[in-house]
Amino acid sequence: MQERMDELSALLEKHIHTHKQVAQYAEMMHLSPYQLNAITKVCLGKSCSVVINDEIILEAKRQLLAGSCQVNELAWQMGYEDVSYFIRFFKKHTGYSPEAFRKNFR
C-alpha cells in the first residue's frame, strides 16, 4: 500500500495544478475512486479528496511565501479560473485570505 501512496504523492506533485478530482488520480493509477479512497483512509486516515485539498493548500502557501505574484496570478497558476472561488477555498482551509496569509507568515 505504501507504493500506492508514493505513486499518489508523485502524481499530486506533478498534476496538482491541473487535476483536482479523486477520479482523475484514480484513473491515472488504474484504480477506482473507491479503491483510492480506501488506500488513503488506511494509510493517512483521510479521504483522497482531503489529501488533494491539503496538497493544493500546501502548494498555494509555498507560492504565497516564496513568490511575489498577485493572488489572481497564483489562482490561475493553481488551475482556478475563478479567482474568488480560489480565495474562498483557501480561506476555508486556512482561516486566512491569501493576502492575509502572506502578510502574517512572511
Image (tube, rainbow, N blue to C red):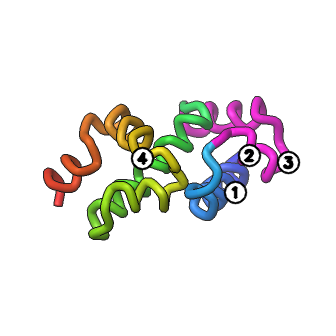
- Mark 2 and mark 3 residues within 8 Å of each other at the beta carbon: no
Q: Secondary structure at mark 4?
A: helix
Residue at mark 2 to residue at mark 3: CA–CA distance = 10 Å
Tell me the crowding category of disc 3: few under 14, some 14 to 19, or many 20 or more residues within 10 angstroms, Cα based: few
* Quadrant assignment, res 87: top left
The kind of residue on which mark 4 rests is: Val
65 left or right, relative to 84: left
Residue at the spot 76% in from the left edge and 34% down from the top edge: 33
Q: Which residue is labeled 2 in the image?
A: 24
Q: Which residue is labeled 1 in the image?
A: 7
User: Which dot, 2 or 4, sits closer to the camera?
Assistant: 4
Q: Nearer the viewer, residue 99 or 16?
A: 99
* Quadrant assignment, res 39: top right
15 left or right, relative to 58: right
Residue at mark 1 to residue at mark 3: CA–CA distance = 11 Å
Please identify the residue farthest to the bottom as the structure is shown: 67
- Mark 4 and mark 1 residues within 8 Å of each other at the beta carbon: no
Rendering coords of residue 32 (x, y %): 82, 36
Residue at mark 4 to residue at mark 1: CA–CA distance = 30 Å
The kind of residue on which mark 1 rests is: Glu
Residue at the spot 63% in from the left edge and 33% down from the top edge: 42
Q: Which residue is labeled 3 in the image?
A: 30
Q: Earlier in the sequence, mark 1 or mark 3?
A: 1
Rendering coords of residue 81 (x, y %): 52, 49
- Mark 3 and mark 4 residues within 8 Å of each other at the beta carbon: no
Q: Which residue is labeled 4 in the image?
A: 83
The kind of residue on which mark 3 rests is: His
Write the start and end of the magenta stretch as one range: 21-45
Q: Quadrant of the C terminus?
A: bottom left
- Mark 1 and mark 3 residues within 8 Å of each other at the beta carbon: no
User: Which dot, 3 or 4, sits closer to the camera?
Assistant: 4
Tell me the crowding category of disc 4: few under 14, some 14 to 19, or many 20 or more residues within 10 angstroms, Cα based: some
